[in-house]
């Protein structure tokens, strides 16, 4: 008799995909990747995956329908983390795709195993990602994948099913029992593998075993996936201190963790484009600020107007934003000079102290670095504003009352009213600041909930507004 | 011979510390408790890492007590003489070391699956007693609940090591010691409770049972429960079934308020009106008669009405008799539950194990009290002896037999696991 292993190897060899390192695109991530990669690859595949996971969290926080979510995430995946089936064209290097997927998961696992909250969020979004991919895959693919995993499920014998016929029909009345044929396929698993089905009394229980129709397979697989990730995270956390790896990896892992907490990957940058042909002048800022600025920038602008002054961090955040907005260097200088006029700073002093800084931000001084405008992640996670300062993300740093007042006064004329506040407050409480900001955008621009900045995207950069 | 009424002797006022001290010194069965919790003869983590919580005189509450051996357990209980003590989870370290650990480092790991059924949850349906009182009659509700739950845990979940313990005043606890049950996480316990929960809603909720599938059928587990509570011809006879308890002994539909509740649950205004006419004019009509009236009235109706009202009647049976469980007790591993053989401070009764096979005949008013037991010891006239010379003996033996069964099964489990390692 050929042993099970030999038979499996034989069938794998016979399969047309035997040459692939990764036989399936679905993955339980049981085995860590065992090859060498560059530091760049290490970081970039993790960032791409983080983008997807954050988007999943956003979708969940915004209560998207499962169908919607699948569409959105599928689109995002195609952009950042494509994963094609074995049947895809020969031009697609499926192995390379799966390798990136595999790597990204493990890097993020390292980054997120350390705190309870990160772990919980990681498990939740990874399980959702797996579920989306599982549901988008076809049944054949799924079957082959599961077979390769040697799930310890028993198929209930026909004899047993016949003896339980009336009870099974009572629980699953819509599952047809053919007149003279064999009963429908059922798996017999420990009830602890399907706690959700048990909690809803959707299965028959006998002596600790649940009889699950084969059609409910997904529930079992998802549960399995989640359990494996949880226990693996546990193991990773224990092994982490022994990673006396170095100053190369730990900072990357730290940034990734920050990225999840802020809700977006650190790397989402905004290239300063030439604009769509409309030149922004200093005079236009005032009007544009009312509707087209996100709350953080409105806040900075209004404080600038009120005090005729901004402290360094606020100035920097705002200057770079305006640069991204399309304000040229000369217009910027005019704008800031006007803003400071009448305040404590005299014109001459202005030239001496502030003009240099503005020019520096535009890359005209010193090392001539062209600083990109800060994205949300940086704004949220860098220094907390103190009493005199107004930089940072208001959704994070303002108290709820102040936030509500600010939203009403600043956006009241654009359609913001108090009925929208509880929802926004909830997002803030849950730490989903960018979702809150996106919702404000939707309300003030009269956009249907869920549309976001177009195509369902959420705010990850002030300039995207 | 002193009569039963002398048992709660004035000499043995359970609120006197001396009484509890004597009880702990001479009567409490430490070895049996140790065997039951430890599931082995030599101390293991199941005992050494187990939390005990003592309630001392003056309501002082001491958590995170743990002991290395049965002897240390005995010494400490005697020294402290708590008015009661509770058993918690097995932790990842010795609970008594909690103060020297990092906050949050002490985590519950394993724990028996436990249940608590309290008579007060039945106050809206029982008619003989209220509040803190209980008697052999309203015990029928507990007896029925035990039969349903015992069957469910064994047949549906496959658990075998169940210990039922009288709670000392008006309820009963169940401890499930199977390895699989000990391993259940909080989430799994929650799922299990969701499976078991049938009667939901406060005293203002009229219809507390809403468990049918969309097609109107009951889950087979619930059909079994209905059958246990309302046996058919040929089923084993029980004293406290729907007819015996609800319709006859408790007469739950006697007065107008009560039978109006019943009519509301039928979901059919027409039938309700017909029955109301008869019942309003006959205030002495027993609940048995009323139920018969309902059946007769139903026979006159069409198939569809019959089916719908029969369904409602099944739900009434469940609403009045299905176990009313305290959900919070069972969901969390770190929940502390009173230890068996503790003495109830108000009644003086000992929390003794109950055999589910004879639960129908259990009489809470005949449970030994600490006063009675100490009197029995007095009558030994200086002959040395402890629980084995008193009425407590059969109860301790029940626990010891149960514990030995657990030890056997645990031993077999270990052997099986070892043989797999090759």
Image (cartoon, coloured by chain):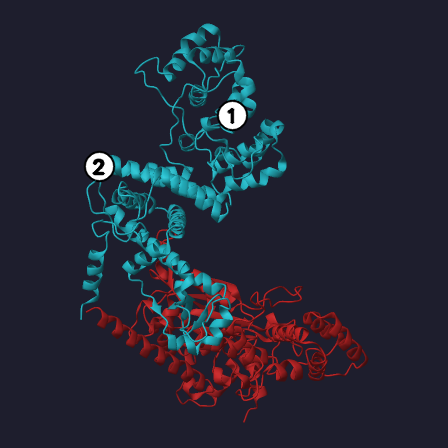
- Image quadrant for the N terminus of chain B? bottom right
**Position of B226 relative to A67 (above/below):** below
In this view, which residue lies farthest toward the top? A348
The crowd level at tag 1 (other Cα within 10 Å; few <14, some 14-19, many 20+) is many
Q: Which residue is mark 2?
A: A38
- Colour applied to chain B: red
Q: Secondary structure at mark 2?
A: loop
Name the spot of residue B187 as percent of width and height, x first: 44, 60
Chain containing mark 1: A
Do we see residue B14 in this rendering?
A: no
- Front position in the image: B100 or A411: A411
Q: Residues within 10 Å of mark 2 (few under 14, many from 20)?
A: few
Instruction: Say whether residue B46 is left or right of residue A431.
Output: left
Residue at x-position 43% and y-position 81%: B27
Tag 1–tag 2 contact (CB < 8 Å): no
How far, Cα to Cα, is label 1 from label 2? 40 Å
In the rendered image, the quadrant that contains the C terminus of chain B is bottom left
């Amino acid at each position: 008799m050929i042993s099970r292993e030999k038979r499996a190897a034989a069938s794998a060899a016979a399969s047309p995909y035997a040459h692939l390192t990764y036989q399936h695109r679905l993955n339980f991530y049981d085995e860590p990747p065992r090859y060498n990669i560059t530091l760049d690859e290490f970081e970039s595949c993790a960032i791409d995956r983080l983008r997807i996971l954050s988007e999943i969290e956003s979708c969940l926080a915004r209560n998207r329908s499962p169908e919607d979510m699948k569409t959105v995430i599928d689109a995002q995946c195609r952009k950042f983390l494509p994963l094609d089936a074995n049947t895809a064209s020969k031009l697609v290097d499926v192995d390379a795709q799966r390798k990136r997927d595999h790597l990204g998961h493990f890097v993020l696992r390292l980054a997120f195993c350390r705190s309870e909250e990160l772990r919980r969020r990681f498990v939740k979004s990874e399980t959702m990602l797996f579920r989306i991919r599982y549901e988008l895959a076809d049944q054949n693919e799924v079957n082959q994948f599961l077979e390769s995993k040697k799930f310890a499920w028993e198929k209930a014998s026909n004899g047993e099913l016949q003896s339980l016929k009336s009870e099974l029909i009572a629980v699953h009345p819509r599952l047809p029992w053919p007149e003279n044929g064999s009963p429908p396929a059922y798996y017999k698993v420990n009830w602890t593998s399907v706690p959700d089905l048990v909690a809803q009394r959707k299965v028959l229980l006998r002596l600790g075993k649940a009889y699950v129709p084969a059609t409910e397979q997904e529930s079992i697989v998802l549960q399995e996936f989640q359990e494996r990730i949880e226990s693996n995270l546990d193991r990773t956390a224990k092994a982490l201190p022994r990673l006396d790896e170095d100053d190369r990896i730990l900072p990357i892992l730290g940034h990734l963790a920050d990225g999840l907490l802020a809700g977006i990957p650190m790397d989402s940058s905004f290239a300063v484009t030439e604009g769509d042909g409309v030149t922004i002048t200093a005079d236009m800022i005032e009007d544009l600020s009312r509707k087209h600025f996100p709350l953080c920038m409105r806040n900075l602008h209004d404080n600038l107007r009120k005090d005729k002054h901004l402290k360094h961090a606020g100035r920097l955040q705002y200057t770079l934003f305006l640069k991204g907005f399309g304000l040229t260097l000369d217009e910027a200088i005019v704008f800031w000079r006007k803003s400071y006029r009448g305040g404590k700073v005299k014109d001459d002093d202005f030239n001496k102290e502030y003009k240099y800084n503005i020019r520096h931000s535009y890359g005209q001084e010193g090392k001539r670095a062209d600083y990109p405008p800060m994205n949300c992640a940086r704004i949220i996670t860098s220094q907390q504003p103190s009493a005199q300062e107004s930089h940072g993300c208001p959704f994070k740093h303002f108290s709820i009352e102040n936030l509500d007042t600010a939203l009403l006064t600043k956006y009241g004329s654009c359609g913001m009213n108090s009925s929208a506040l509880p929802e926004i407050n909830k997002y803030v409480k849950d730490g989903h600041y960018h979702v809150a900001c996106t919702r404000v955008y939707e309300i003030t621009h009269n956009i249907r909930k869920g549309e976001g900045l177009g195509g369902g995207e959420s705010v990850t950069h002030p300039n995207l507004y | 011979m002193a009569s039963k009424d002398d048992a709660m002797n004035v000499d043995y006022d359970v609120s006197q510390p001396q009484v509890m001290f004597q009880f702990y010194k001479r009567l409490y069965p430490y070895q049996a408790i140790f065997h039951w919790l430890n599931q082995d003869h030599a101390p293991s983590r199941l005992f050494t890492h187990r939390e005990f919580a003592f309630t001392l005189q003056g309501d002082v509450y001491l958590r995170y007590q743990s002991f290395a051996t049965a002897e240390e357990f005995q010494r400490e209980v005697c020294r402290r003489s708590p008015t009661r003590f509770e058993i918690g989870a097995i932790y990842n370290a010795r609970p008594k070391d909690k103060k020297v650990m990092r906050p949050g480092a002490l985590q519950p790991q394993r724990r028996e699956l436990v249940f608590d059924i309290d008579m007060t949850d039945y106050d809206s349906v029982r008619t003989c007693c209220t509040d803190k009182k209980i008697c052999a009659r309203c015990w029928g509700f507990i007896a029925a609940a035990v039969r349903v739950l015992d069957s469910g845990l064994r047949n549906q979940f496959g658990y075998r090591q169940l210990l039922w313990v009288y709670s000392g005043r008006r309820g009963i606890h169940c401890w499930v010691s199977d390895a699989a049950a000990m391993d259940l996480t909080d989430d799994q316990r929650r799922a299990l409770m969701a499976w078991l929960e049938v009667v939901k809603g406060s005293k203002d909720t009229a219809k507390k049972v809403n468990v049918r599938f969309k097609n109107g059928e009951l889950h087979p587990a619930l059909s079994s429960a209905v059958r246990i509570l309302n046996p058919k011809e040929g089923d084993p006879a029980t004293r406290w079934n729907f007819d015996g308890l609800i319709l006859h002994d408790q007469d739950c539909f006697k007065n107008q308020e009560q039978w109006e509740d019943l009519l509301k649950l039928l979901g059919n205004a027409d039938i309700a009106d017909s029955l109301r006419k008869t019942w309003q004019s006959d205030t002495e009509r027993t609940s048995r008669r009323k139920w018969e009236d309902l059946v007769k009235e139903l026979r006159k109706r069409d198939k569809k009405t019959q089916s719908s009202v029969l369904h409602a009647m099944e739900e009434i049976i469940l609403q009045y008799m299905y176990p009313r469980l305290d959900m919070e007790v069972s969901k969390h591993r770190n929940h502390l539950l009173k230890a068996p053989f503790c003495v109830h401070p108000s009644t003086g009764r000992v929390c003794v194990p109950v055999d589910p096979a004879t639960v129908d005949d259990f009489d809470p008013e005949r449970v030994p009290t600490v006063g009675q037991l100490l009197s029995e010891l007095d009558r030994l006239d200086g002959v040395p002896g402890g629980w084995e010379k008193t009425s407590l003996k059969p109860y301790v033996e029940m626990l010891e037999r149960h514990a030995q069964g657990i030890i056997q099964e645990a031993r077999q489990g270990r052997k099986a696991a070892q043989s797999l390692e090759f």
